[in-house]
Image (cartoon, rainbow, N blue to C red):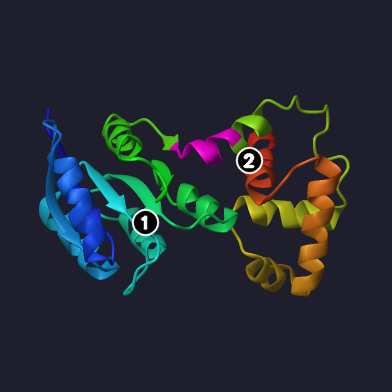
Amino acid sequence: MTIRVVIVDDHRVVRDGLSYLLGQEPDVEVVGEAGDGRRALAVVAATRPDVLLLDLYMPEPDGHVVLDALRDAPHQPAVVVLTSATDDENLIRAMHAGATAYLLKTASAEQVIVAVRDAAAGTASLSPELLTRLTRTLRRPPPQDPFQPLSPRERDVLRLIARGYSNRQIARDLAIGEQTVKTHVRGILTKLGLQDRVQAAIFALRHHPNS
């Protein structure tokens, strides 16, 4: 079976490099490419690929908007995000929007190829750096009441972190100051023994899937 791939990145040199890389694999065929979000949706509709290799930082619109739009599209390919966005908010938002894999642009050629094949097979994957962080969180045994240390307001903030909200969005949703949100986030991480927002989001989703 040949895996049909569309490549979306606003840098031509990146698209050319990925196209050459994937073109060397006997079971992969690059059937289209795009340099912006609007063109990406058109190419996906026209070619109906198995896998969409997608950057997040793009014009007209960005990769997150593409992910959201694909939810209601007639054809929904598996999406491998390949990006330089290392922050927690982009990771959480992309995975919530349905990305099958999330790789950083520091990934090796072999990692990209494996992620494309895994995505085509329906297997989710993360970059090794991110996987290590998530594994560390999941290995921590949960307390009987995992949210007991948190105040009601901290629980509200954690719920929105799990939905991929930024500090600004949380502040607007809860009608509090952005600095207050930052204080609550620090309190959540300290009380739950977590390192960052990714671990906090995974913690919330693990213990309360409907967060």
Q: Which residues are magenta?
A: 126-132
Contact between labelled residues 1 and 2, with CB atoms less than 8 Å apart: no
In the picture shown, does residue 179 fall above or below 1?
A: below
Three-letter amino acid code at the position of disc 1: Leu
Q: Position of residue 91 (x, y in %)?
A: 51, 51
Q: Secondary structure at mark 2?
A: helix
Dot 2 or dot 1, earlier in sequence: 1
Query: In terms of secondary structure, what is the magenta stretch mainly?
Result: helix
Q: Is residue 73 visible?
A: yes
Q: Position of residue 31 (x, y in %)?
A: 11, 49
Say if the magenta span includes residue 131.
Answer: yes
User: Disc 2 marks which residue?
Assistant: 202
User: Disc 1 marks which residue?
Assistant: 67
The one nearer the camera, 45 or 11, is 11
Q: Position of residue 141 (x, y in %)?
A: 75, 24
Mark 2 and mark 1: span between their CA atoms?
A: 20 Å
**Quarter in which the N terminus is drawn:** top left
- What residue sits 66% from the left and 71% below the top? 168
Left or right: 93 in relation to 174:
left
Say if the magenta span includes residue 167.
Answer: no
